[in-house]
Amino acid sequence: MSRSCILLALLYGLSAAPIALAEPPCAEQCKKFVEEGELRDDVSPVGCFVRVCQREARKFYEKHEFKKALESLDYVQEHLDRSPSYQMERGLNYYALGRFDKALAAYEKVLKGFPNNVRTRSQRGHTLVRLGRLKDAQKQFESLFADPLTEDEFKGLRTRSYLMSNIGVIKLLQGDVEGGKAALEQGLELDGRNRPARSYLTDVVPYMESGDLTPKGAMRLLVAYEELSFGRHDSGAKELRELLERSPRFRPGYFRVAEVLMATQQYEECVETLEDGEKALPDDIDLRAERLRCSLLQLGPNTDKARPSLEEVKSLAKAHPENERLQQILTAMEQ
């Protein structure tokens, strides 16, 4: 057996016989370095696998390839299982895959060694929300808010603004609309850049106050937005459409799902969804304009089939010259 093969055998406890298990690309890369004698003298085989596989996992995560990221992390688990940064990465990938119990376990391993880590404690709070443990999640964010370590910035916001807006969202999910609104307003006062807080105050709270959106609906909305953030557009759109079936007067949902469906060229589904919106909100010109936009994209804006839709746009624009959506469509057609 060659020296390089002996090194690999010692590293993995392998016999000389080849294994049939699939390995992540990082493993093949390091094995090639060892076999061809290209490994730097100051880097051990274990060090190569650890470094390359972690780097590979981060790249997979950025590309929303979470299963592949976990495969790369699993390959070096024996050597990194006690590493806080390693467990954090595992937790993020488990969370993205919807494996929330495992994500929580990974975060709690991190917190054993670093109990004051703001990022991990925050992510633990989000995970508790997805597990339906809303009271525990609220306590998690409230404990962070009271911590002097949260005076700085986190995720491009003043940390306490970020935390308070999360407390507000959790209160909404619990049905405490008044308390949720107050917390969101406080979050926005702490940092005017807090777009999520502003969005909830304008697009969610009024509909919960009117009864057109329930706490369960707000949770489905949160899930839909997370699915979209992870690049799962079909799943996000499905969640939004199911939300609208149960909350047909939740106006912002129609525009968000239309945006997603147009971006993924699902024009027929876009038209159908907005037709449902028009039935629920027959006086809403913006919904009608978006439905016509989807129709023009579906049929081809310059085709004979699209002519009735275009004429409807022109008629509506004449009756509602102040409507920006209609004017945008006409401007696009002129180009």
Image: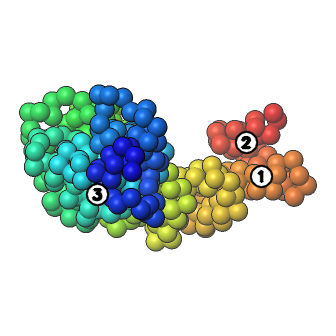
Asked whether, in this view, residue 78 is left or right of residue 53, the answer is left
Apparent side of residue 324 relative to residue 73 in the rendered image (left or right):
right
Residue at horizontal 19 percent and vertical 36 percent from the top: 160
Q: Looking at the image, which residue is at 68% across and 54% down?
A: 265
Q: Do callouts 2 and 1 mark residues in contact (Cβ within 8 Å)?
A: yes
Residue at disc 2, secondary structure: helix
Give neighbour class at mark 2: few <14, some 14-19, many 20+ (Cα, 10 Å). some
Q: Nearer the viewer, residue 126 or 305?
A: 126
User: Where in the figure is residue 135, as x and y percent of width and height?
Assistant: 16, 61
Q: CA distance from mark 2 to mark 1?
A: 9 Å
Tell me where residue 52 sits by quadrant.
top left
State how far apart marks 2 and 3 are (Cα): 65 Å
Task: Using residue 108 as the reference point, say whether residue 255 is left or right of it.
Answer: right
Residue 211 versus residue 52 in the image, above or below: below
The residue pinned by badge 1 equals: 296
Q: Is residue 224 visible?
A: no
What's under tag 3, amino acid-wise? Gly
Residue 5 visible to the viewer: yes
Location of residue 332 in the rendering, given as x and y in whole percent from the top left corner: 76, 37
